[in-house]
Image (spheres, rainbow, N blue to C red):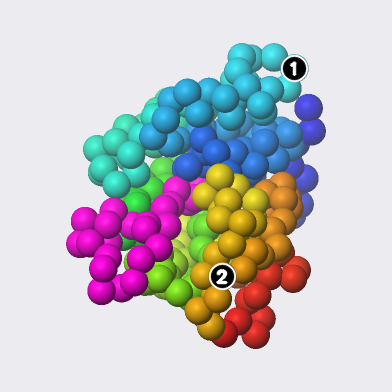
Amino acid sequence: MTTPETRPGTTLPPAPTALITGAGSGIGRAVTLALAGAGWSVVLAGRRADALKETARLAGRSGDGPEGPAALCVPADVTRPDQVDALFAAARARFGRLDLLFNNAGTFGPPVPLEELAYDDWRTVVDTNLTGAFLCAQAAFRAMKGQDPRGGRIINNGSVSAHTPRPHSVAYTATKHAMTGLTKSLSLDGRPYDIACGQIDIGNAATEMTGRMRTGILQADGSTAAEPVMDAADVARTVLHMAQLPLGANVQFATVMATAMPYIGRG
């Protein structure tokens, strides 16, 4: 079993523990596979227990064996403080510490004109993308401040929408701009406790949530066009690089996107 590289200034133990939200599919699943393949213990969180178990199986962590300890699968709704508390308590009880939180759970919401967006749909996106990320980061801070050795890392899943919106994406775009503020505040507040925080902004990774990009999606000029996508494994490799840095170094912001997608020059 390979383990993350140890460098001067790091507090990572030989087999560190990562907690991944939204781990049942897409980016969360790809990142879980990359971390598990590099020797990390993994805690998988999401709303669908069956999907989490499938991720664990694909990662070779459905049972203790030569690839490492079995993944801990914890069905949880990150918008519920009680469930977030239970999730992090279960992670600490199983593995004893937390070295990485990948704040990944999120939703787009319906792609409708702003004036047609229902209040409940707005709240669902804000509660999942922003409040859920805050609650998980807060729980991670508590764990990382109190463990020995102290510290850890939080990586927030932003989006290229944290910089440039798509049409009909007001709730998603607003939360991803807010995620950047959350990342900066976590970075500042984490300094005294050896807690590093960075953000990865992703554009057009091929997942279940982005299927319409390959068939045709609304453009800023009102047309509909298919867009290039990239493999989610390309994102996962970047998250793994960020995760394996010593805590004395941090990738504050990274953008990983399909090379030819309409982002630079969008509009």
Name which residue type carries label 1: Pro
Check whether the beta carbons of the residues at disc 1 and disc 2 lie within 8 A of each other.
Answer: no
Q: Is residue 43 above or below residue 203?
A: above
> Is residue 182 shown to the viewer in this render?
no
Q: Is residue 184 above or below residue 197?
A: below
**What residue is at 59 percent from the left and 39 percent from the top?**
29
Tell me the CA gap for discs 1 and 2.
49 Å
| Disc 1 residue crowd, few under 14, some 14–19, many 20+, Cα 10 Å | few
Of 264 and 22, the residue lying toward us: 264
Of 202 and 144, the residue lying toward us: 202
Q: Identify the secondary structure beneath mark 1.
A: loop
Give coordinates of residue 96: x percent, y percent.
Answer: 49, 30
Of 203 and 140, the residue lying toward us: 203
**What residue is at 64 percent from the left and 64 percent from the top?**
226
Give coordinates of residue 180: x percent, y percent.
Answer: 46, 71
Q: Quarter of the image holding residue 37?
A: top right
Name which residue type carries label 2: Thr
Left or right: 123 in relation to 231: left
Q: Which residues are magenta?
A: 97-125
**What residue is at 60 percent from the left and 81 percent from the top?**
266
> Is residue 65 shown to the viewer in this render?
yes
Give coordinates of residue 203: x percent, y percent.
Answer: 62, 64
Q: Which residue is mark 1?
A: 66
Q: Quadrant of the N terminus?
A: top right
Q: Which mark is residue 224?
A: 2
Tell me, yes or no, whether the highlighted magenta stretch contains residue 123: yes
**What residue is at 39 percent from the left and 34 percent from the top?**
47
